[in-house]
């Protein structure tokens, strides 16, 4: 349209657009008021916590606030040789204040995260500092322990100066910033998180594959059976939704344990020897079986809703045109179900990647996922910032998958029902 | 090659879905090669079931179907080589028009250049050249319908089945498509079995029409014969408009019969009545009855005009005649019939030959 298009006026001379906006304003306000409660609810329960999590995962103010003068004095220090008296005096001043508030223990814990060995020398410094004389703090502090005269330790303190840090993220990938300020991996035998990330991806991937393989025929059956049977089948599919997740997981524990029903059955039909019952729980198998069963409806429902819309005459057309049943299925039916497959797989994968209760109960040591590690840090080590960092890494991983899916398949093709 | 008389043959075919009701009862039907045959009937009459059995999507409960002399009950649909046009077109929505047409050729492993020629030919047959790269969703209903027809013909099948293909189109488009399909049939000489519940569609297009009701073929004959000479009252009522008189045969002789109504007697043509005293339903086409007949007719009665409805090219007149208040006349608008006014008494006449005394049902 050219810019010369005449502005259309209503009969009373007001531009049509203005008039239209005015007429629609009332409805817009009404609509907004209707969604407002949900919007506030989302902000409070979703946006705010995630923002807080993001903040926590990078927040490193604690040390910054404990040693304000020291860090101020350190601004001019180049970090090559031991800092001069000014820094030592400032550190002494900060430290005395911390001892008065009985917070030096926290400082030692925090500094110990950065470099091992701070705990003992801070304890020693506290005792010695009571007898310190005024002036020449450098000499006095260095005399407390030889590590206080080591430039490495002062550098470690300096590294804690920034208020924000990404080190929790590095830790989540088994990496850290070494003395020279480079990002390196931790020793091989201490790399626990990478294994967990990979395992999480692997389990989520295979659970998605298993769910797909099982759900596709069920969904097809649901979509093609006459109403009275398909309703019954639908109830069977939905039944798990109405049962507590914990109960379902617990029932899998009963089924899968070594003296459990499945093993008894295998022994009964002579598949395995009684003294050689396979372990189907507290390992990956347990996680696979239980998670597949629990996530199955999330695959069935989107597939079903898509298949329901595919006219049976399409398959017939495929066959009448000379395609074998397989060709008709593969060339005609299957491509039409891709929106449902995409939706189902995305749903199951995203749910599986953050799954928590089931792997915690039936996963054992080799079947736990990253979410269990997050929970561990939330509840046991109380390292919330680390838990937040991993949580956010998980979230961004999901977003990356979502983005990839959009690139490859296109999000418009998704159909959830 | 001489045309085969029984190119498609239904022999004693029964079909039941639930083991309780027969949807198709002892069907006998021969279809000649190159013929355009229509299965016409109300919904639930078994016509679509017959088509599905022929296509291979349903199996006969009893009896056998032959195609070109071969029994086909055990041949799966994809090996029958029958083209089919479905009610809702059943175009593959994720494929372009070209790909839709290429599908039957690809599964037959026809080389690409030859396939392209066939596709071009098929598209030009339905005048859709230049639409090859469109998706079905971008086409109008009529265009989709043409694509479906082209797709059913592109692999040169000897037999094409059409299952109410025009049902979803509007009236004008439906009529033009009827002629188009008829012309395609005439130009390539393929055998067509067409299913519809629309009698005008059946009358316009077919060589022969099989009227289905209650799982049985009621009458199988050419359109004109079907219309002019229905063999039973179902066909008479189903095809076209029909005036009926219920009565009892009072006399039957010399190819004519007298039928006694409640308050009068009329002369009729005995079709399914044999003897005196039988109940009968006399059927008369509205256009066979004339107002104030000049020729000598053996039935002339007085009636009162109850309703006059203007229809553009003709006027429908409802007359209370011989105790039948629903007697319909169609009067062409060209003739200046000044007598046709509400409440007028007029004379109605018809030949006994056109009044067919059928089963009473």
Image (cartoon, coloured by chain):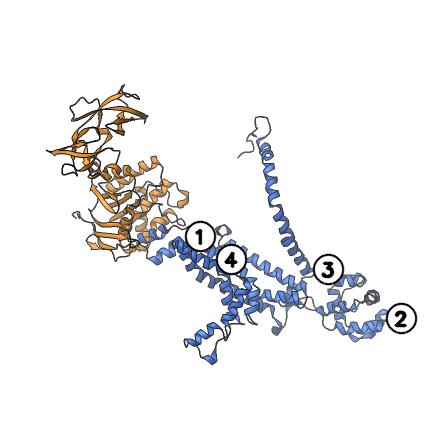
Q: CA distance from mark 2 to mark 3?
A: 32 Å
Quarter of the image with the C terminus of chain B is top left
Q: Residues within 10 Å of mark 3 (few under 14, many from 20)?
A: few
Find the residue positioned furthest to the bottom. Answer: A275
Nearer to me, B269 or A4: B269
Residue A142, above or below A348 = below
Q: Earlier in the sequence, mark 1 or mark 3?
A: 3
Residue A200 drawn at (x, y percent): 55, 65
Pinpoint the chain carrying mark 4: A
Q: Which residue is mark 3?
A: A163
Q: Which residue is mark 1?
A: A306
Q: Residues within 10 Å of mark 2 (few under 14, many from 20)?
A: few
Nearer to me, B263 or B164: B263
- Nearer the viewer's eye, disc 4 or disc 3? 4
Q: Are marks 2 and 4 on the same chain?
A: yes
Which label is found at residue A346?
4
- Nearer the viewer's eye, disc 1 or disc 4? 1
């Amino acid at each position: 349209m050219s810019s010369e298009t005449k502005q259309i006026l209503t009969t009373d001379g007001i531009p049509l657009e203005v008039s239209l906006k005015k007429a629609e304003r009332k409805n817009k306000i009404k609509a907004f008021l209707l969604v407002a409660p949900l919007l506030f609810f989302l902000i409070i329960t979703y946006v705010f916590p995630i923002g807080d999590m993001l903040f926590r995962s990078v927040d490193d103010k604690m040390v910054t606030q404990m040693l304000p003068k020291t860090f101020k004095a350190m601004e001019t220090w180049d970090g090559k040789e031991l800092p001069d008296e000014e820094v030592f005096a400032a550190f002494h001043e900060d430290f005395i204040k911390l001892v008065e508030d009985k917070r030096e223990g926290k400082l030692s814990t925090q500094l110990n995260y950065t470099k091992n060995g701070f705990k003992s020398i801070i304890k020693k410094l506290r005792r010695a500092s009571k007898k310190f004389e005024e002036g020449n703090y450098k000499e006095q502090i260095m005399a407390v322990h030889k590590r206080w005269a080591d430039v490495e330790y002062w550098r470690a303190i300096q590294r804690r100066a920034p208020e924000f840090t990404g080190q929790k993220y590095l830790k989540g990938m088994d990496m850290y910033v070494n003395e020279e300020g480079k990002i390196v991996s931790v020793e091989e035998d201490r790399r626990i998180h990478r294994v967990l990330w990979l395992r999480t991806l692997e389990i989520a991937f295979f659970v998605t594959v298993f769910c797909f393989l099982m759900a596709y025929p069920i969904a097809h059956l649901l979509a093609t059976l006459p109403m009275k049977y398909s309703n019954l089948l639908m109830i069977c599919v939905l039944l798990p939704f109405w049962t507590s997740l914990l109960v379902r997981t617990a029932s899998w524990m009963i089924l899968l344990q070594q003296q459990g029903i499945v093993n008894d059955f295998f022994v009964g039909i002579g598949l395995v020897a009684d003294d050689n019952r396979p372990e189907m729980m507290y390992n990956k198998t347990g996680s696979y079986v239980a998670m597949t069963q629990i996530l199955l409806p999330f695959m069935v429902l989107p597939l079903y809703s898509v298949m329901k819309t595919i006219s049976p005459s399409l398959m017939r057309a495929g066959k009448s045109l000379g395609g074998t049943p397989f060709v008709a299925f593969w060339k005609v039916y299957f491509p039409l179900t891709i929106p449902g497959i995409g939706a189902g797989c995305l749903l199951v994968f995203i749910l599986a990647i953050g799954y928590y209760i089931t792997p915690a109960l039936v996963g054992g040591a080799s079947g736990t996922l990253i979410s269990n590690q997050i929970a561990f840090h939330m509840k046991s080590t109380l390292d919330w910032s680390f838990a937040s960092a991993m949580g956010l890494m998980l979230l961004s991983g999901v977003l990356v998958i979502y983005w990839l899916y959009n690139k490859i398949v296109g999000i418009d093709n998704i159909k959830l029902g | 090659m001489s045309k085969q008389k029984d190119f498609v043959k239904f022999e004693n075919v029964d079909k039941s879905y639930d083991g309780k009701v027969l949807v198709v009862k002892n069907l006998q039907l021969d279809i000649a090669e190159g013929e355009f045959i229509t299965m016409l009937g109300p919904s639930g009459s078994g016509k679509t079931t017959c088509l599905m059995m022929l296509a291979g999507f349903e199996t006969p409960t009893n009896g056998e179907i032959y195609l070109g002399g071969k029994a086909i009950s055990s041949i799966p649909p994809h090996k029958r080589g029958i083209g089919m046009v479905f009610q809702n077109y059943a175009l593959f929505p994720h494929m372009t028009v070209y790909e839709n047409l290429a599908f039957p050729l690809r599964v037959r492993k026809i080389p690409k250049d030859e396939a392209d020629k066939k596709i071009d030919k098929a598209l030009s047959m339905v005048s859709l050249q230049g639409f090859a790269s469109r998706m079905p969703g971008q086409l109008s209903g009529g265009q989709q319908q043409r694509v479906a027809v082209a797709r059913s013909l592109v692999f040169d099948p000897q037999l094409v089945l059409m299952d109410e293909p025009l049902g979803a189109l509007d009236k004008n488009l439906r009529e033009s498509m009827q002629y188009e399909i008829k012309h395609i049939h005439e130009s390539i000489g393929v055998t067509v079995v067409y299913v519809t519940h629309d009698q005008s569609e059946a009358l316009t297009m077919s060589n022969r029409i099989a009227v289905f009701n209650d799982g049985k073929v009621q009458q199988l004959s050419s359109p004109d014969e079907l219309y002019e000479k229905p063999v039973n009252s179902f066909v008479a009522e189903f095809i076209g408009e029909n005036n009926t008189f219920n009565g009892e045969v009072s006399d039957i002789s010399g190819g004519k019969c007298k039928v006694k109504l409640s308050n009068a007697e009329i002369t009729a043509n005995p079709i399914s009545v044999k003897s005196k005293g039988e109940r009968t339903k006399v059927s008369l086409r509205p256009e066979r009855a004339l107002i104030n007949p000049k020729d000598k007719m053996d039935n002339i009665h007085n009636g009162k005009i109850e309703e006059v409805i203007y229809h553009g090219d003709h006027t429908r007149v409802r007359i209370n005649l011989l105790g039948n208040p629903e007697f319909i006349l169609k009067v062409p608008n060209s003739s200046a019939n000044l007598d046709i006014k509400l409440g007028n008494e007029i004379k109605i006449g018809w030949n006994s030959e056109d009044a067919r005394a059928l089963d009473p049902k």
